[in-house]
């Protein structure tokens, strides 16, 4: 049997591994240089553009008229679910009348790839009036009084449209008006409008994945509209609120980003039984979430950081509940005044929230009655550090009565400046934590350990990626005698 020179073969394998790594690194570097030095794309390099055919405004009233118009205009489709009428590719000037009016129909139709514009003098881009089964998708609306208006119209879908109105007041991207129920609005962009999406007296709608930012007043406004679902919308940098609910009950708001608005990220006014979950309401607005004259709301797992005044502001409310779970709580930190502020409110539960690094108190209660505050994390609020100082108390309770800063079964909050002594090792500090204010409140059972643990920073992912690349490209060797198998390049034999 021929003798194999393993040392020589190992050298060859290592050489080929180094060569492969060097070639891969060379390709990456050349690609980066080519990207940097490549000339900027010109208009001739851009993808194919949609060309619109100039067309007069369209008026359709009733199923029979829809059929006649489709035949006359040579539109495809027959109005059924499997073969809807197709209106597409038009450029319509709405300065003299509504761009497209469709009323009193229940046939199926799609309006797509149209540009409808300049309906400034109280004209709408598209008006669906007593309509069902319509789809408006992939259109551009500019400078119309309303881009799309629905009135007594149910079961329609408005998606993937762009609404732009040049900062002019009294102009709305999408207006959902008067008993327009069970409609879907998703993936639309509404900017430079008075209001991005406005729902009035309409219910059971789904408003999701829309970008309603940089509008004069509100990103999304619900007025007297209930049982709607608002999910995954971006409503940022608006002139007043990101999302505003007024006289609207039993709605669900989840996973929305409402940041950098002038006043509030989300404002509930006279709106009850609403669930706010996993929303990000942060950065330079007056309040992250404001609850005013509203009852029986649940506000959980929201991030309300770095706002001018408070992360969460509650005023004149009864029986509101602000709650969450460990690592799934409201994060109200680094705000200009308070983490959570409650005024003239009662029967609320404030628990499992992270209130850290706020300029003043983590939680501030004023004229509140019968509230329970427990299982919260207070870290470095009001100038407090890791050692107690009577001038830097992290909670405030004044002018009210019967508030309890711990649960009835012996669990309080965690305070960064009040963690010992615990002589009996039961996890409860042996002395109560005194709360500022004129009612003599205290936390009778302060916790010795924090209940909030920060999530991994987003920087972990890119660092891990770089480490993986280094592992693949770097020289690796099989460790001898330790039973460890490192990842090595496959020899090119």
Image (spheres, rainbow, N blue to C red):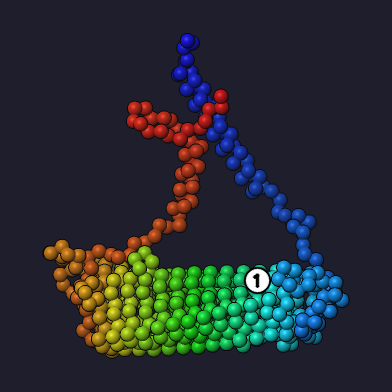
Residue at 23% over, 68% down: 447
**Quarter that holds the C terminus:** top right
**Quarter-of-image position of residue 272:** bottom left
Front residue of this view, candidates 126 and 452 = 126
Q: Is residue 328 above or below residue 271?
A: above
Q: Is residue 9 left or right of residue 110?
A: left
Q: Position of residue 324 (x, y in %)?
A: 37, 71
Q: Position of residue 377 (x, y in %)?
A: 30, 69
Residue position marked by numbered label 1 in the rendering: 159
Residue at 29% over, 77% down: 373
Residue at 57% over, 78% down: 205
Does residue 164 show up? no
Q: Disc count in the image? A: 1
Q: Is residue 117 above or below residue 45?
A: below
Q: Residue furthest right?
A: 72
Q: Is residue 38 above or below residue 214?
A: above
**Quarter-of-image position of residue 99:** bottom right
Front residue of this view, candidates 28 and 82 = 82
Front residue of this view, candidates 92 and 457 = 92
Residue at 47% over, 22% down: 10
Q: Position of residue 9 (x, y in %)?
A: 49, 20
**Quarter-of-image position of residue 220:** bottom right
Does residue 324 show up? yes
Q: Residue furthest top?
A: 1
Q: Position of residue 442 (x, y in %)?
A: 22, 79
Q: Secondary structure at mark 1?
A: strand
Q: Is residue 226 above or below residue 277?
A: below
Q: Is residue 96 left or right of residue 316?
A: right
Q: Residue furthest left?
A: 423
**Would you call the spot at circle 1 few (<14 residues within 10 Å), some (14-19), or many (20 or more)?**
many
């Amino acid at each position: 049997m021929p003798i194999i020179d393993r040392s020589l073969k190992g050298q060859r394998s290592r050489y080929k591994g180094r060569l492969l790594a060097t070639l891969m690194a060379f390709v990456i570097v050349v690609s980066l240089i080519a990207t940097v030095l490549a000339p900027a794309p010109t208009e001739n390099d851009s993808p194919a553009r949609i060309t619109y055919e100039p067309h007069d405004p369209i008026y359709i009233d009733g199923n029979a008229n829809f059929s006649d118009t489709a035949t006359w205009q040579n539109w495809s489709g027959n109005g059924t679910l499997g073969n809807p009428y197709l209106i597409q590719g038009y450029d319509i000037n709405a300065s003299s009348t509504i761009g497209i009016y469709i009323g009193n129909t229940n046939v199926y139709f799609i309006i797509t790839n149209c540009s409808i514009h300049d309906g400034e003098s109280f004209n709408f881009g598209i008006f669906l009036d007593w309509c069902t089964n319509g789809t408006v998708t992939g259109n551009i609306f500019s400078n119309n009084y309303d881009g799309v208006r629905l009135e007594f119209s149910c079961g329609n879908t408005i998606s993937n449209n762009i609404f732009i109105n040049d900062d002019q007041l009294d102009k709305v991207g999408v207006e959902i008006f008067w008993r327009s129920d069970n409609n879907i609005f998703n993936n639309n962009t509404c900017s430079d409008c008075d209001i991005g999406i406005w729902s009035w007296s309409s219910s059971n709608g789904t408003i999701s994945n829309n970008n309603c930012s940089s509008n004069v007043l509100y990103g999304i406004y619900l007025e007297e509209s209930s049982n709607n679902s608002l999910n995954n919308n971006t409503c940022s940098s608006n002139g007043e609120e990101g999302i505003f609910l007024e006289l609207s009950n039993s709605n669900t708001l989840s996973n929305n980003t409402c940041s950098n608005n002038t006043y509030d990220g989300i404002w509930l006014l006279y709106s009850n039984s609403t669930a706010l979950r996993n929303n990000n309401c942060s950065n330079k607005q007056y309040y992250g979430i404001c609850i005013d004259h509203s009852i029986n709301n649940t506000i959980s797992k929201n991030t309300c950081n770095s706002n001018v005044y408070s992360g969460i502001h509650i005023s004149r409310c009864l029986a509101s509940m602000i709650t969450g779970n460990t690592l799934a709580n409201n994060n109200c930190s680094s705000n200009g005044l308070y983490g959570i502020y409650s005024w003239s409110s009662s029967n609320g539960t404030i628990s499992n929230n992270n209130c850290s690094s706020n300029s003043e108190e983590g939680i501030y209660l004023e004229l509140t009655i019968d509230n329970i505050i427990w299982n919260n994390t207070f870290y470095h609020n009001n100038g407090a550090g890791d050692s107690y100082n009577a001038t830097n108390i992290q909670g405030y309770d004044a002018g009210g009565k019967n508030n309890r800063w711990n649960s009835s079964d012996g669990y309080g909050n965690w305070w960064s400046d009040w963690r010992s002594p615990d002589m009996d090792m039961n996890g409860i500090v042996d002395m109560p934590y005194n709360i500022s204010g004129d009612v003599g409140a205290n936390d009778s059972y302060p916790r010795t350990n924090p209940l909030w643990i920060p999530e991994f920073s987003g920087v972990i992912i890119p660092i891990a990626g770089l480490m993986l690349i280094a592992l693949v490209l770097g020289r690796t060797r099989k460790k001898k005698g330790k039973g460890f198998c490192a990842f090595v390049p496959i020899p090119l034999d």
